[in-house]
Amino acid sequence: MTPQAKLIFTSSLALGTTITISSNHWITAWAGLEINTLAILPLIAKSHHPRAIEAATKYFLTQATASALLLFSAMMNAWYTGQWDITQLTHPTACLILTSALAMKLGLAPFHFWFPEVLQGSPLTTALLLSTLMKFPPMTLLFMTSPSLNPTLLTCMAILSTALGGWMGLNQTQIRKILAFSSISHLGWMAIIVSYHPKLTLLNFYLYSLITATVFLTLNTIKTSKLSTLMTTWTKTPALSTMLLLTLLSLAGLPPFTGFLPKWLIIQELTKQSMAPAATTISLLSLLSLFFYLRLAYCATITLPPHTTNHMKQWHISKPTPSAIAILTTTSTMLLPISPLILTTV
């Protein structure tokens, strides 16, 4: 792909995201989502591999269906109430259809089936965009319409997402699929709290995007996409592998790291809302995903490769760690001590 084409597609991604997050009218929000979808498709299919073409086709079909449902819910609400404003969504059927549309856009269970397949067929940099930037516009719409949505439905979908994200990721050997199921699991945490404390959902999304960006950029630097090659990276890039270990533990939500902050705040808020059973359930289900994060961390740092492997050994890299990854790793692991400052913005 030529640099000019890349520039056009990334500019279109930025434009589509900006249009959606800054719009008050359903039509402009929908137009921004469509620009986003059309801009990311060439980036998914740029390798021309059959799996990449398949991923782009699956992505296009699911996103087109979700956009059609979103437009249908907006038109139904406008038909009954005369309102095209995003925050004035009041018709119950329109709210239900919108919840389904946004769940499909985000990859929230039970509309999650497309996400691991699309991520597996995409390059690591495009997979990073799909996991973070492409979820920002639908997350903004979820934030804006949160007072109108059904909390019980969102809670059920959230618990189902956390359960399926943890359970289906256990047996994976492809790192992109593991990170896709990790994303589905994290979306459960965001969806469960959006009706009660929407700003916490955004905080969780920002921190999740930060940590996931660190993981994807690290994997892109060491050119690793499956567990068997991840086992050989310690001898090649020990410093980067150590960073990856800490970032994965942060993504798992273990206490001294940044990833613990949103989980802690969400459990606290759910308990305040007399939803202790839901908080207990989602916390126990996140232990499933903790297993595969620990498995990734174990493969990255503790395992030394056996001598009978069939893959090619890679040369030791003497290049310094990119400064962007160093900065991202620091923020991904060490923001917990300044959590009182972060809480002032929530």
Image: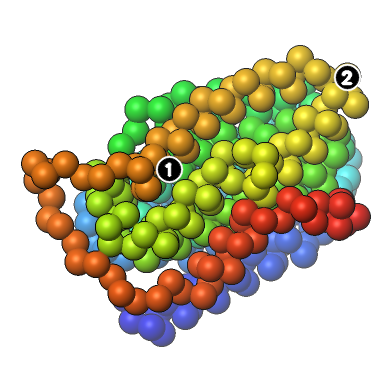
Residue drawn at x 62%, y 38% is 254
What kind of element bears circle 2?
A: loop
Q: Where does the image place residue 61, in percent across and percent down from the top left?
A: 44, 45
In front: mark 2 or mark 1? 1
Residue 64 makes an appearance in the image: no
Q: How many numbered discs?
A: 2
Which of the colour schemes (rainbow, by chain, secondary structure, one colour) is used? rainbow
Frontmost residue, 302 versus 105: 302
Q: Position of residue 49 (x, y in %)?
A: 22, 57
Q: Is residue 23 visible?
A: yes
Pick the residue in front: 5 or 304. 304
| Label 2 or label 1, whichever comes before in sequence order | 2
Residue located 77% across and 62% down the image: 23
Which amino acid type is marked by label 1?
Answer: Ala
Q: Is residue 22 above or below residue 175?
A: below
Rendering coords of residue 346 (x, y %): 87, 51
- Point out residue 42 in the picture as x, y percentages from the top left corner: 38, 65
Horizontal side of residue 59 vs 340, given as left or right? left
Classify 10 Å Cα crowding around label 1: few (below 14), some (14-19), many (20 and above).
Answer: many
**Spatial distance from mark 2 to mark 1, Cα to Cα?**
36 Å
Bin the neighbour count of mark 2 within 10 Å (Cα to Cα): few under 14, some 14-19, many 20 and up: few
Q: Residue furthest bottom?
A: 4
Q: Residue at x 61, y 56 (%)?
A: 332
Amino acid type, mark 2: Ser
Q: In the rendered view, does 173 fall on the left or right side of 131? A: left
Which of the labelled discs sits on residue 88, or is there none?
none
* Residue drawn where x is 82% and y is 20% of the image: 275
The residue singled out by tag 1 in the image is 297
Which mark, residue 274?
2
